[in-house]
Image: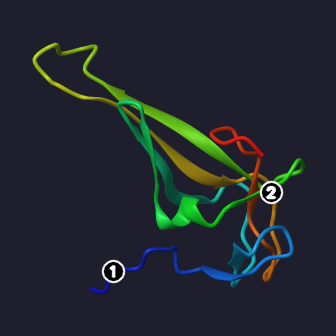
Amino acid sequence: MNYRPLPEQLTIAPSTIHKLGLFTEEDLEQGTNLGMSHLRLGNKIIRTPLGGFLNHSNDPNCVKAELRFTNEDDPDLKFDYKKWNLIVAKDIKKGTELTVRYTFYNI
């Protein structure tokens, strides 16, 4: 098995929004979960390759769904982190750039 930093249906290409962006290589249906885009460990936010090439839009076609993992139920466990998965918010046609509304960074 080979490591793929991006889901099979996505590629990085020149963007009209900002330098490079994520583009579909096939049609994507609303609700498709493309995987983890960001991870928060303590005060640091880590972008995965999926999150690193997302560009901002005021009318995005994807959203970041937050998942929180915490030791609230078992104080012997030492973890508290969040991750965000990229979810397709509306049907997207092949060749379209994926966009999100930035929430972590100033634009």
**Position above or below: 9 against 32:** below
- The image quadrant that residue 29 belongs to is bottom right
Judging depth in this view, the residue of 5 and 87 nearest the camera is 5
Q: Secondary structure at mark 1?
A: loop
Q: Residue at x 81, y 75 (%)?
A: 96
Q: Is residue 102 left or right of residue 2?
A: right
Q: Amino acid at mark 2?
A: Asn
| Tag 2 secondary structure | loop
Q: Residues within 10 Å of mark 2 (few under 14, many from 20)?
A: some
The percent coordinates of residue 58 (x first, y second) are 88, 47
Q: Is residue 103 left or right of residue 95?
A: left
Name which residue lies at 63% across and 80% down.
12
The reply to whether the C-beta atoms of the residues labelled 2 and 1 are less than 8 Å apart is no
- The front one of 16 and 23 is 16
Kindly give the residue lying farthest to the left in the view shown: 76
Whichever of callouts 2 and 1 sits on the residue coming sooner in the sequence is: 1
Q: Dividing the image into 4 quarters, which one contains the N terminus?
A: bottom left
> Mark 1 sits on what residue?
3
**What residue is shown with label 2?**
61
The colour mode here is rainbow
Name the amino acid type tagged 1.
Tyr
Q: Is residue 90 above or below residue 58?
A: below
In the image, residue 39 lies at what x, y percent? 43, 45
Circle count: 2
